[in-house]
Image (tube, grey):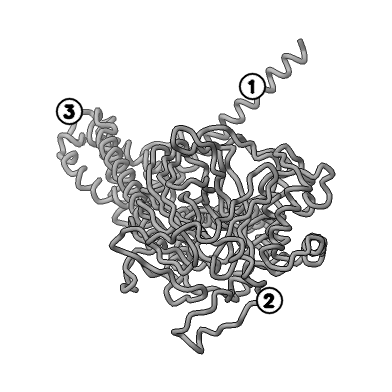
């Protein structure tokens, strides 16, 4: 059970921010203590069967030592450097590793079984192809765009498919200050400015920010999640995530490449070679494809490569269309899906089968929704050696009163194809959605970059030397503004708050206990107060007073078991003698403590043994067993009551 809970927790924590990792520490502490207690219970049970004798305090002593060792191990593990990564063990967590494949299969089965709950957009680091997305017509955004053409809004791009999409090829997060402009090398683009008003924020695993692809400037502080194929997503921080009422401005560069320019870009296999190491100052030809981008975005899972049906279908489509250029091949794939499949959200994919294989070859109705269309096109393009990726966001919505109204039903996914020199170009394979209009030659005049006093350039693909730096100030490689640093600061802040909260609760508990302890038995004489407190502490430590025992006998037992030193035992015996004589001696006799003056010595004697009694209780906290014992008694009482009622009903 512990192992299963651990697996579920690790899967969940793998999809959340760093601060929540404290939950893993708490779980490990509780799990290790539970295992320690279980093994101790088994050992004691074995000793009892064999008739072996052991100390009554052995259980608590073992638990104390075990807890100390457990906490020490966790603290050392927390303090160890986290930058080292064992390559073989790291494969376990990837989508191709055993845990990643299990998660993909579980998500696929789970989403195929039931339709999603009603939502107006749900965006995560993974995109699962399941049943009905159940999108509502709630208004999500109001968007004003300074462009005649309607624009798709992007939240996140995916690079790796394995029965669902995920983000694997991620290099780093970089912090971008307010109104800082990202400089890009993409050719033939024009700028589009959008003012986005959040009406009802979509569900998000991370604080994704929305805007027309490709975003180069925001009026909010943000972080860009960068990968081998460019920016994967823009992420807000604690104060700039998508919340109802948030209003911000986005500036994007939109492709102005016309059909002729795109047709001039060859297939990656036919593109010219270029070695930047041989000529660092030379500019690559426009037809040059970055090898890392081609490698990462033409990957197809091994099981789909062995199946070969997707590649065979893609090759058949481009052959029948007589498509020679990369652009013509991509449009042939787009047209085929739009013409041979219909759009329908109310689908029921078969569990245990890859969703895209089911959509293309086993679905007799030849229908599906955007996730299936875009995934099919992306994988078919990749099977031909064309770099492609999956994009999730929102369709343009409806134009009303000078702005676009975007609703939950506009949540959408589509395909982007990488054209050397021109970057990622949008394609719409989903039936019932309008295809993207390509600009005419020289239709748009390249717009100057936004007026901003600060501009930055992201490190080139594959360059790792810049990881962790804050590109608000490119000259400062040691600034602490990266997203990783911000996450660490957030974690430290939350940890400090948690620790201070615990300390405050402990302090309040101590104050309340001291106040209660001083008032305990305050209505009695000093000797009776001290005797009552001794009995209370002894009971907390598990030393119960029998009704047949006299105070002399009870304190004598405590002298032998609780207070081991001879001096403390003598003090305890004298306290008991004073209490007995005060309680039962003749008040007028000289033996009474008030007449002999012994009552004045009691506070000093109590002060001598009080701390030792508290320490004994701390090392033998038998009172902690009262809570589970009380719960068990109450449970047994309820069970007996139910049985009596059941018996009465049967007799009746």
Q: Nearer the viewer, residue 583 or 182?
A: 182
Of callouts 3 and 2, which one flags the residue occurring earlier in the amino acid sequence?
Answer: 2
Q: Decide: few, some or many residues near mark 1? Use Cα within 10 Å; few <14, some 14-19, many ≥20.
A: few
Relative image position of residue 405 (x, y in whole percent): 49, 36
Relative image position of residue 370 (x, y in whole percent): 66, 46
Q: Are marks 1 and 3 in contact (CB under 8 Å)?
A: no
Q: Residue at x 52, y 45 (%)?
A: 150
Inter-mark Cα distance, 1 to 2: 79 Å
470 is higher (above) or lower (below) than 165: below
Inter-mark Cα distance, 3 to 2: 114 Å
Q: Nearer the viewer, residue 201 or 568?
A: 201
Residue pushed farthest bottom? Answer: 278
Residue at the disc numbered 3: 588
Q: Residue at x 22, y 35 (%)?
A: 526
Q: Secondary structure at mark 1?
A: helix
| Residue 481 shown left or right of residue 595 in the figure | right
Residue at the disc numbered 1: 641
Q: Is residue 35 visible?
A: no
Of callouts 1 and 2, which one flags the residue occurring earlier in the amino acid sequence?
Answer: 2
Q: Are marks 3 and 2 in contact (CB under 8 Å)?
A: no
**Mark seen at residue 269:** 2
Relative image position of residue 641 (x, y in whole percent): 64, 21
Relative image position of residue 315 (x, y in whole percent): 79, 64
Of callouts 1 and 3, which one flags the residue occurring earlier in the amino acid sequence?
Answer: 3
**Quarter assignment of residue 259:** bottom right
Front disc: 3 or 2: 2
């Amino acid at each position: 059970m512990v192992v299963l809970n651990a697996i579920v927790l690790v899967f969940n924590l793998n999809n959340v921010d760093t601060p929540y990792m404290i939950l893993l520490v708490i779980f490990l502490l509780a799990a290790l203590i539970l295992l320690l207690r279980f093994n101790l219970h088994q050992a004691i049970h074995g000793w009892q069967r064999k008739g072996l004798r052991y100390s009554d305090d052995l259980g608590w002593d073992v638990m104390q030592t075990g807890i100390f060792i457990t906490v020490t191990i966790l603290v050392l593990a927390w303090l160890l450097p986290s930058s080292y990564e064992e390559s073989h063990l790291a494969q376990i967590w990837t989508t191709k590793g055993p845990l990643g494949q299990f998660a993909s299969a579980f998500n696929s089965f789970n989403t195929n079984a039931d339709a999603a709950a009603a939502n107006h957009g749900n965006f995560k680091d993974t995109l699962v192809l399941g049943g009905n997305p159940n999108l509502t017509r709630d208004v999500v955004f109001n968007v004003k765009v300074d462009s005649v053409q309607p624009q798709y809004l992007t939240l996140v791009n995916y690079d790796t498919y394995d029965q669902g999409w995920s983000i694997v090829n991620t290099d780093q997060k970089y912090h971008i200050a307010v109104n800082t402009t990202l400089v890009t090398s993409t050719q033939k683009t024009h700028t589009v400015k959008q003012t986005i008003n959040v009406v009802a924020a979509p569900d998000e695993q991370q604080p994704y920010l929305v805007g027309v692809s490709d975003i180069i400037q925001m009026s909010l502080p943000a972080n860009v999640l960068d990968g081998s194929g460019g920016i994967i997503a823009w992420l807000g921080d604690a104060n700039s995530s998508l919340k109802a009422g948030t209003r911000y401005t986005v500036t994007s560069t939109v492709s102005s490449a016309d059909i002729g320019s795109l047709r001039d870009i060859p297939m990656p296999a036919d593109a010219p070679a270029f070695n930047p190491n041989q000529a660092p100052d030379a500019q690559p030809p426009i037809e040059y494809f970055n090898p890392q981008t081609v490698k990462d975005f033409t990957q197809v899972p091994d099981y789909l490569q062995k199946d070969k049906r997707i590649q065979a279908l893609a090759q058949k489509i481009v052959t029948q269309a007589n498509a020679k250029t990369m652009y013509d091949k991509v449009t042939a794939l787009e047209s085929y899906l739009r013409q041979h499949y219909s759009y329908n959200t109310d689908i029921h994919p078969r569990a245990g089968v890859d969703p895209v294989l089911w959509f293309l070859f086993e679905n007799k109705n030849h229908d599906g929704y955007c996730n299936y269309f875009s995934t099919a096109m992306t994988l078919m393009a990749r099977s031909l050696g064309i770099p492609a990726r999956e994009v999730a966001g929102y369709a343009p919505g409806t134009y009303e009163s000078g702005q676009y109204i975007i609703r939950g039903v506009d949540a959408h996914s589509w395909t982007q194809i990488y054209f050397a020199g021109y970057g990622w170009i949008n394609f719409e394979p989903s039936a019932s959605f309008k295809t993207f209009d390509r600009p005419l030659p020289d239709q748009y005049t390249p717009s100057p970059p936004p007026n901003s006093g600060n501009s930055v350039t992201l490190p080139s693909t594959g360059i790792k030397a810049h990881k962790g730096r804050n590109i608000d100030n490119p000259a400062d490689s040691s600034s602490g503004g990266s997203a990783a640093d911000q996450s660490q600061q957030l974690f430290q802040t939350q940890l400090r708050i948690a620790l201070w909260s615990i300390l405050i609760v402990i302090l309040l508990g101590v104050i309340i206990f001291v106040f209660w302890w001083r008032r305990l038995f305050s209505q009695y004489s000093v000797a009776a107060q001290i005797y009552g407190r001794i009995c209370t502490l002894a009971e907390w430590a598990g030393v119960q007073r029998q009704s047949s025992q006299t105070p002399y006998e009870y304190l004598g037992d405590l002298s032998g078991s609780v207070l081991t030193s001879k001096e403390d035992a003598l003090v305890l015996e004298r306290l008991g003698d004073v209490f007995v004589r005060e309680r039962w001696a003749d008040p007028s006799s000289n033996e009474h403590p008030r007449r002999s003056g012994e009552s004045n010595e009691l506070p000093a004697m109590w002060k001598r043994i009080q701390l030792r009694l508290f320490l004994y209780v701390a090392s033998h906290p038998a009172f902690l067993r009262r809570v589970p014992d009380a719960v068990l008694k109450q449970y047994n009482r309820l069970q007996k009551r139910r049985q009596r009622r059941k018996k009465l009903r049967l007799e009746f």
